[in-house]
Image (cartoon, coloured by chain):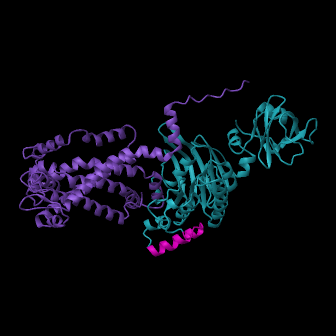
Chain colours: A purple, B cyan
Amino acid sequence: MSMLATIQAPKDGFLRRVSDVLVARRGLYLMLLLVPPLLWLGIVYLGSLFALLAQSFFSIDEFSGTIVREPTLKTYGELLSPSNLDIILRTLSVSVIVTLLAAVIAFPIAYYAARYASGRIKAAFYLAVMMPLWSSYLVKVYAWKLLLAKEGVIGWIMDRLGLSWLLDAWLAAPLVGGPSLSVSYTGMVLVFLYLWTPFMILPVQAALERVPSSLIEASGDLGASPGQTFRKVVFPLAVPGLVAGAIFTFSLTLGDYIVPQIVGPSSLILGQVVYTQQGTAGNIPLAAAFSVVPVVIMGVFLTIAKRMGAFDAL
Amino acid sequence: MKTRSHFGHPMAISSTPSAVSFRGVERHFGSVKAVDGVDLDIAPGEFFAMLGPSGSGKTTCLRLIAGFEQPTSGHIEIFGETVEGVPAYRRPVNTVFQDYALFPHLNILDNVCYGLMVRGIGKDERYRQGRDALAMVKLMGMEQRKPGQLSGGQRQRVALARALVVRPKVLLLDEPLGALDLKLREEMQGELKSLQRSLGLSFVFVTHDQGEALSMADRVAVFNDGRIVQVASPQDIYERPRTRFVADFVGSSNVIEPMQTKAWAGIDKAASLRPEKIALLPDGASGSDGAVVVPGTIAQVLYHGAVNRVELALANGGRLLAAVPATSPVLPIQGASVRASFAREALHVMESA
């Protein structure tokens, strides 16, 4: 038997030497990896966020309409005026309803996809959930306006099914009703639901996917009925996914200003107020103060979720 | 009185029903027959091991008892009651899972008390029983920890306590020691055995580790290809393997081909010969009366501490594996000419190939 020849390492080139240095110095390697995105996030994102925060502590001179660059809480005081408080509460209610409904719709779909679907069906699931995200947001909202309009598709279908009376009764109801679906809160919530439900389905599905089937079997093995297993094991373990999904649906609804402009009643929603205050009204401090509201609300929401043990299973 | 004597099993005659009985049970997954006609009876209070390579159907059989799977055909009874269509949560059996399956969002005490909680037992009573169960597996003081903070061995004990606290009639264990390191595994083997004795429960234990099955079980069922090849006491399984598969799978064995058996013992059938039954003699020595003596050379020696495993190349071209004590007078040296000697009775003739 002949001796095996040693396989020669390739000749040292410049890139190879760079690799050698990077492998030896992990710190340098990580820094090169992280500095560009951190610079981007730090300057562009956090920078503008802090600029916004700073603006909210300025105020506007009521006579000249110019910004007074002195720290004051006056602008925040304005937030608490009845009309502004109304806007905040209205936005909050819509966001909460959209989030709850999205969770109710998303859960069974996510559960099916995580526990039962596999192979082609799973691929079809991802496609079906993601596909609405491929087309333009504006196109979708205007399409919904047509669906919801008085002479629109939904009205026509209800008419054909002999259910016009049901639609009319719904529209006659206070708060949720209106002259037609397209100018009612019902319509607005439906469009928000359509837009944001994928953002709820995916994290819930990911959370359920991480629940090993042996846990569900163990629960049954120990005597828990399927309902008990769902309440005591499956649901608690899906909560982090639900909270993650809720962060999306909640904050996306809180900040949106296009949907309420196209669909829904004439009363303003928070996003619209920010839009008009910084634009036509030129009241940047008030716009900034309004922008801080969703940040605070999300902070409160996450704190409550953490207190309730939503992240214990993480 | 018409008993179930046509099953030809002693349990059918006695009045106490088996803890678990299978009659012609099959379980198919598509075209794969995971369990292909299994009959078995597990006695109350018995430590029963199901041994086999992966994919041999042993785990599926365990899952059929637990109720996670339903048989494609055949009949299963637990303490005389038919369990077809009875869901897992209504069966008097509990399982210790291979991955322990502890609930990650509950602390140790709540994990152990889970089965009591879903039965609606009040907090004080269930925590009292839960603490007793934790004491039984020597895990006091861990009540408030989460499963993620425990070592593998501790998690295994929690899983055991959680299954036992609801007082099952049969405890099912699915390779419970597989994830533990060797030292801990040996320790747990002893503990499981004494726990089973003191509780007087039927334990059904699935394993692919033949050492585990032999050391713990009262009876061992050896599985292959969805069927039971042999059910017997550990001694019988080891000393008297019924088939070549059992001889090969349980411990290491020399399988002697029929022609060779005929030459050595006058029986025209395959036989098994355990390596430790073979002694080494110096070249040219003659064996004692009734012993078979075969000349050969040492092809390889593997040192195992207490024994040397010696591979012999026989003069007729065959090979023999011998386990020679380190105290043997003949030093096993590679290439040396020696003689292998064994009693004729050491050749165990097998029923089928």
Query: Which residue is pictured at 48% across the width and 74% down the height?
Result: B125
Q: Which residues are magenta?
A: B123-141
Quadrant housing the N terminus of chain B: bottom right
Residue A51 location, x and y as percent? Answer: 24, 55
Residue A267 location, x and y as percent? Answer: 10, 57
All told, the count of numbered labels is 0
Query: Can the viewer see residue A96?
Result: no
Corner quadrant of residue B226? top right
* Left or right for B285, reference B277: right
* Left or right for A187, reference A35: left
Query: Can the viewer see residue B296?
Result: yes
Does residue B126 belong to the magenta stretch?
A: yes
Magenta stretch: dominant secondary structure: helix
| A20 or B237: nearer the viewer | A20
Figure check: B238 above or below B20:
above
Does residue B127 belong to the magenta stretch?
A: yes
* Left or right for B250, reference A142: right
* Left or right for B284, reference B193: right
Residue reaching furthest to the front: A69
Residue A235 location, x and y as percent? Answer: 37, 58
Residue reaching furthest to the bottom: B124
Query: Which residue is pictured at 44% across the width and 73% down the height?
Result: B123
Residue B292 location, x and y as percent? Answer: 87, 38
Query: Which residue is pictured at 58% across the width and 46% down the height?
Result: B38
Quadrant housing the C terminus of chain B: top right
